[in-house]
Amino acid sequence: MEKNVEIDNKAIGQRIREERGKLGLTREEFAEIIGLSDYYVGQLERGERQMSLPVLVRVANCLHVSLDYLIFGKTAYHAYYVHDARNTYDTFDSKKDIELNELLNKCSPKELDLVKKLIKTILPYVGKN
């Protein structure tokens, strides 16, 4: 029989903050996406609150990480997640990719930042239907 593992809310909160930062989301933006108050998200990130399972799942889905990673800091089954796939789309092979690349090349740096922020905002909702 396995030992009971104590949940470290501060470590979970730190991982949430780090992953949110990798996505370039403010606490307020992240809270809005997952349907929570930014105050509550702040409490989670500081380890002051323990979240319910449904909230934990929403957080993991939004951040594109596994529940194992959020809770334990590692993935038990070495599952493949978006954040593991760095530089997957560096080459543009299809016509759609070429069109997207051409559109992005026409953007100013400010417009590119906006496009990145929009993509990061909608990613948690893609494929939910």
Image (spheres, rainbow, N blue to C red):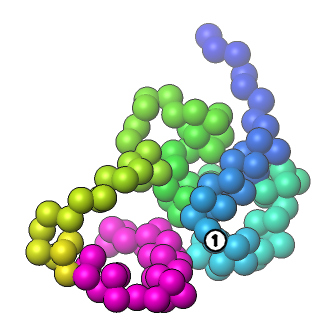
Is 118 positioned to the left or the right of 15 in the image? left
Residue at image point 44% right, 45% down:
84
Where does label 1 land, which residue?
25
Q: Tell whether position 121 is magenta.
A: yes
Question: Is 9 left, or right, of 125 in this rendering?
Answer: right
Q: Position of residue 81 (x, y in %)?
A: 42, 47
Is residue 86 inside the magenta stretch? no
Residue 117 placement, left or right of 49? left
- Crowd rating for badge 1 (residues with CA inside 10 Å; few <14, some 14–19, many 20+): some
Tell me the quarter of the image containing the N terminus. top right
Magenta-colored segment: predominant secondary structure: helix
Residue 58: in sight, yes or no?
Answer: no
Image position of 8 (left or right of 55): right
Q: Where does residue 109 sit, x and y in percent of width and height?
A: 51, 84
Location of residue 58 with respect to 11 vertically, above or below: below
The extreme right residue here reads 48
At a point 82% along the width and 45% down the height, the residue shown is 10
In the picture, the quarter occupied by the C terminus is bottom left
Dividing the picture into quadrants, the one containing residue 67 is top right
Vertical position of residue 71 compared to residue 107: above or below: above
Q: Is residue 83 visible?
A: yes
Residue type indicated by callout 1: Leu
- What are the residue bounds of the magenta stretch? 100-129
- In the foreground, 25 or 47: 25
Residue in view at x 20 percent, y 81 percent = 99
Q: Please give the count of numbered marks on the rendered protein.
A: 1
State the residue lying farthest toward the top: 1
Across and down, in percent, residue 57 comes to 56, 55
